[in-house]
Image (cartoon, helix red, strand yellow):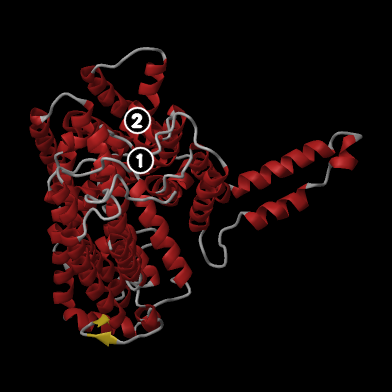
Amino acid sequence: MTVGVQLGIVVGYLLLALAVGLVAYRLADRTAEDFYLAGRTLGTVVLLFTTFATLLSAFTFFAGPNLAYAYGPEWILVMGLMDGIIFAILWYAIGYKQWLLGRQRGYVTLGEMLGDRFGSRGLRGFVAGVSLLWLFPYVMLQQAGAGTALEALTEGAIPYAAGAALITLFMILYVVVAGMRGIAWTDTLQGAFMLVTTWAAAAWVLASVGGPGAATDALAASEVGSEFLALGTDYYTPQWMLSTAITIGFGVAMFPQVNQRFFAAGSKTVLKRSFALWPILCVLLFVPAFMLGAWGRGLGVPVPDGGNVLPVILGEYTPAWFAALVVAGAMAAMMSSSDSMLLSGSSYFTRDLYRPLVASLGRDLSTRREDLLARAGVVCFALATFVASLYNPATLFELGNAAFSGFAQLALPVLVALYWRGTTRAGIVAGVAGSQAFYLATLFRWVIVWTIGAVDAAVQAVPILGPVLGGFSPALVTVVTTVVRDSYLGWTPGIVGMLLGLVLTVGVSVLTSPAAAEERTLYFERLRAD
Amino acid sequence: MRHAELVGWIAAAIVLAALAVPWFLWGSTTVVAGLPLWLWWHVGWMLLAAGVFWLFAERAWGIGVEPERDGPGPSGGELR
């Protein structure tokens, strides 16, 4: 019965989304700006919930409660700090400025905004390339996740590849038809659904066990009691909590599907209201969802290895149809995040990589043609990530999991450029390239160490050269593993990389002069909302 | 004047971020009304943050981003 209900809800959601998409399609102008940004007309509720649902879908239902179950509920603090405070501040510092510039100059992507200021098509392509490097595997992870979830849901009746293909096809159809407007509308439904079901789930479980006092007493009496209730553990150290909150908070602002929403607000009032409501929305969602995970530990709910705690708790304490509703809703939420990523990936690809290439060949794109191209970009991007998801390459998984910190490396160079006239093209390129190279090196340290060993072995095999130049690998490996590591006195490589990006951007800008094509006053003059 | 106001708002933002986690309750296991005290602090602090953000949006929105209206010529970040 449960499987039927879950499938019914997933299919129902897909049909509802499709209907919303068709309405959106009827309202849309056939331009790329309308397709990517809903013509910059989003209102408060829609902008707030679409950003919210895009940011926080599957993590809230699955990974977050699992972490609270495993390590204690302090994740709520990390989430509140990064999403409720840090992201809200960036919403103003980066978002509002981007919105003003976007309205004035018609920007659709971050790369366009930077490329214009620094008079560089190369920078524009570079920023798009870096963004796609992190976005591509992240989209792939969503498809893999949806494929796995559908397979589990149908107990193998729909195999992994078929599930992933089904989701991909639906997303292509949906995004191509609906564009940003349709996505934002379904996200709004999704966000409201997440809030209501999370609170209903918490209320249901607490009513069954005798209220929050009883649930917390059970947690205190369990083997993890004092450790889970006390603030901080060996896992939640201050350095780790701050590193995580800062890198993810800044990373989110540079994630293409979130960053582009900065351009999509209908008015200044919309931005203002969303900004003030943000911390409340975060607390409303995270406290019940993550506490359920932590309480589950105290209630002795058995979670199988690799399983998710929330469905198990719901299965134990709520009726089957409700548990099915929440789980299916979470899957739908996963898709609602992926469709935004797909749309943004396509915009970076067509606007920042393809269009400049066409322009450099001396050809111009009509609005109508660019709109068609945008939709074709969605298809290409979705098919490429789908093929990758079938092979599950380990390298791509590593990139996908590290995507937030990868995007966070972009944030400080962009902030410096937005607020300091002295930033030069060489400065921002050094900041972006340097921090990305550093962060990638920490992720793929094993590749570097392996390469050093292989080169050393090759050199040693050469008869005369070998004894003189060979045997360098132990020393070089020591140097590499000293510079590039998993933890710097408890701080993560992500935050060290961000600092490096800041130092490089400012330092190189001070040492170099601006290029002739730079427009140094672009971000400062005539910037006004009305 | 506008500059002092900007510095004030930046300080407020830093304080809001710095105390979202109640570091002074580190290691505390006190439970109040079924939830850890540190969680109550966080919930209250987020409500306070929303209030401060609302006040900022009403009174100072645009500061540091839009050029000043009455100043002589364009400013808004004369750092160099």
Q: Is residue A253 visible?
A: yes
Marked residue chain, label 2: A
SS under mark 1:
helix
Alpha carbon of mark 1 to alpha carbon of mark 2: how far?
A: 9 Å
* Residue A477 to residue A85: above or below: above
Q: Of residues A64 and A103, which is closer to you in this image? A: A103
Name which quarter of the figure residue A295 lies in. bottom left
Q: Give coordinates of residue A123: x percent, y percent.
A: 45, 33
SS under mark 2:
helix
Residue at numbered disc 1: A139
Q: Give coordinates of residue A90: x percent, y percent.
A: 32, 54
Extreme front residue here?
B72
- Report if the CB atoms under discs 1 and 2 are less than 8 Å apart: yes
Dot 1: few (<14), some (14–19), or many (≥20) neighbours within 10 Å? many
Q: Which mark is residue A381?
A: 2
Amino acid found under the numbered disc labelled 1: Val
Q: Is residue A6 visible?
A: no
Q: Of residues A236 and A206, which is closer to you in this image? A: A236
* Residue A332 to residue A514: above or below: below
Q: Of residues A41 and A23, which is closer to you in this image? A: A41
Q: Earlier in the sequence, mark 1 or mark 2?
A: 1
Dot 2: few (<14), some (14–19), or many (≥20) neighbours within 10 Å? many
Q: Which mark is residue A15?
A: none
**Count of labels in the image:** 2
Left or right: A160, with A289 as reference point: right
Q: Give coordinates of residue B59: x percent, y percent.
A: 17, 61
Left or right: A71, with A327 as reference point: right
**Residue drawn 36% across the image and 51% down it:** B77
